[in-house]
Amino acid sequence: MKDARPCSIADTLALVGEKYSLLVLREVSLGARRFDQLVRNIGAPRDVLTARLKRLVDAGVLEKVEYSDRPKRYEYRPTSSGLELVPVLMTLMAWGDRHLHADGDRPMVIEHICGHELVPQIVCAECREDVHQHDLTAHPQAPGWTVTGPAVA
Amino acid sequence: MKDARPCSIADTLALVGEKYSLLVLREVSLGARRFDQLVRNIGAPRDVLTARLKRLVDAGVLEKVEYSDRPKRYEYRPTSSGLELVPVLMTLMAWGDRHLHADGDRPMVIEHICGHELVPQIVCAECREDVHQHDLTAHPQAPGWTVTGPAVA
DNA sequence: TCACTCAGTTCGTTTTCCAAACCCGCTAAG
DNA sequence: CTTAGCGGGTTTGGAAAACGAACTGAGTGA
């Protein structure tokens, strides 16, 4: 990881790319916010989960909220920046549904308020057209980026 | 990870969620496809990279293509299913740009064919409306899912 | 012959992960 | 008052993964 290219993808993954971190986000987004629930639903070792939660709280992606003193008890909630990671979860889920559950046995379906099952689609916020890889051009802004081949895709 | 909930997010992460895997996909999508380029641009240990490449090839996300016999040399290219992970990279990048480079010093800018900088936005493929967390409802299809709190978000 | 490239492999060490056991403050039951 | 249980962790000791540096091996070019 040293000497790597400067990159927001790498930076984001350095924060939430460790094992279990995004699953923690899945759980807290779905409403499971207590330590023992997280352990059960994710299946992570308790000490590892402790480390991940601390990191996510330090990064401002989660907040630790006391829901009872005597005994002191805490739960973890997504902050607004944490909720902004939900699109990452949706695109990961869509890919898994398409390529790992092609038989249609999807473990979970998300319904959009419009009444349809959510199939997340990425569009350009400006022109609202669907984004296809070959419509993209990469413009490095920092040194270390000598793009060799074609643009994105 | 044992006893965890069935979930396409977890399944996808099991495949491409290890350290460096998504960065490999970034590189091959941008055109850096040779082993030494990947080592340099990603900054990964060579043996780890070897393992990741093997896993991604086995999963059908990359393909290993001979670009020279004598000496035998290979490069790695994204398959169509690999390219379908680009939206994941875009959403990760957008989050990092927003939250980790709020000062505007983005390491890289992607230009959409419409002429604007790409700001990826997720919409419902059906109704084309922007997706907001509170417009989503989770419908577990498999056992192991007793959603406790509110829907997604 | 010597130096160099590329695509890995091997080595010995450090880090991280893991499951199970334990701890602590507290409540509720017997 | 003793014991059982819950929630939210910490501790422990061993197994696995990551790490950087060195090395290999086929081939090129000077």
Image (cartoon, coloured by chain):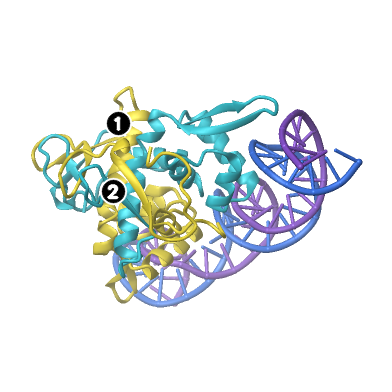
Chain colours: A yellow, B cyan, C blue, D purple
Position of residue A9 measured from the top left corner of the image (x, y, whole percent): 40, 53
- For the residues beneath circles 2 and 1, the answer to whether they share a chain is no
Who is closer to the viewer here, B50 or A32?
Answer: B50
Is disc 1 surrounded by few (<14), some (14 to 19) or many (20+) residues within 10 Å? many
Position in image of residue B117 (x %, y %): 25, 52
User: In the rendered view, would you say B136 is above or below A70?
Assistant: above
Looking at the image, which residue is at 51% across and 48% down? B20
Q: Residue at x 41, y 43 (%)?
A: B4
- Could you say whether the residue bearing mark 1 is in a helix, strand or loop? loop
Q: Is residue A143 left or right of residue B94?
A: right
Local SS, label 2: strand
Q: Which residue is mark 1?
A: A106
Which quadrant holds residue A62? bottom left
Quadrant of the drawing holding the C terminus of chain B = bottom left
Chain at numbered mark 2: B
Q: Is residue A100 visible?
A: no
Residue corresponding to mark 2: B111
The spot of residue A19 in percent (x, y) is 47, 51
Q: Can you say whether B60 is above or below A64 in the image?
A: above
Q: How far across and how far down the image is residue A71, in percent?
A: 34, 74
The residue sitting at 45% across, 40% down in the picture is A149
What residue is rendered at 41% in x and 55% in y?
Answer: A21
Q: How many marks?
A: 2
Estimate the spatial distance between the alpha carbons at disc 2 and disc 1, rounded to whole Å. Answer: 34 Å
As shown in the figure, which amino acid type bears the numbered disc 1? Arg
Q: Can residue B138 be seen by looking at this rendering?
A: yes
Give the chain of mark 1: A
Which-is-in-front pick, marks 2 and 1?
Answer: 2
The kind of residue on which mark 2 rests is Glu
